[in-house]
Image (tube, rainbow, N blue to C red):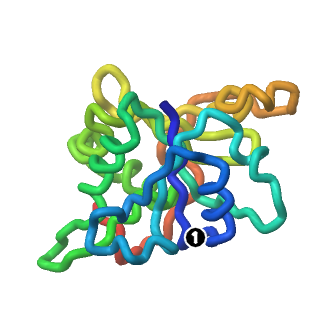
Amino acid sequence: MRYLCFDTAINNEYTLFRLRQEYAAQQCLFQGTRDENIWDAAPWLFRTDDDFYARLSHPLVKLDHCLLIDSPEPMSNLCEYLQAFIYRKEKGKELFFRFWDARVLHHYLAHASAARQQEFFGDMIDAVYLEKTAQQFVRLSLNQQRLLQAEAVPAAQLFPSRENEPGEAGQDTPAETMPGQAPKKRRFLLD
């Protein structure tokens, strides 16, 4: 199953409302946490198997720094699994780990130990896709040796309705050159 992980804080409430109208299978990642009252700035999961970019084409819709997650699990299980990563303790302080922001997750996975990478993917996540350009995504997954691999994936492969659009050839992309490099100081990112 494929899930869109949408960050309302980066994008906007209008897009959240449009997503909630279009996709019946949805869940706020803050649901059941102590921050569930800030749903309007929270990350959300939407079950989607279509080209949501095309479906929601409107000048006010923003879908920046979203993630696509492939998981064999139903939404409720995936949501519960991801909630375990929201709060992290670092040097006695509790911080948000904003993994739902593609820039943060890319930086984290590119610099994390193999054990941390494996902890994030576990048995629940098969792959995560980050948008590199409108026509190309980067697929992050663990290979057979359980090591992080990154590969370029044309948007037409993720969204078959785009098959006739020109795209970039898919080539392996090293983790160090993936999109969305985060600033060196991010108070909510843990390494």
Instruction: Using residue 184 as the reference point, say whether residue 17 is left or right of it.
Output: right
Q: Amino acid at mark 1?
A: Ile
From the image, tell me which residue sits under label 1: 10
Indicate the position of residue 21 as horizontal and vertical percent values: 65, 55
Indicate the position of residue 85 as horizontal and vertical percent values: 28, 57
Above or below residue 159? Residue 181 is: below
Q: Nearer the viewer, residue 172 or 156?
A: 156
> Measuring 75% from the left and 40% from the top, which residue is drawn there?
135
Above or below residue 19? Residue 182 is: below
Above or below residue 171? Residue 187 is: below
Instruction: Using residue 30 as the reference point, say whether residue 122 is left or right of it.
Output: left
Instruction: Using residue 95 as the reference point, say whether residue 149 is left or right of it.
Output: right
Quadrant location of the C terminus in the rendered image:
bottom left
Q: SS class of the residue under badge 1? A: loop
Indicate the position of residue 181 as horizontal and vertical percent values: 53, 60
> Measuring 22% from the left and 66% from the top, which residue is drawn there?
88
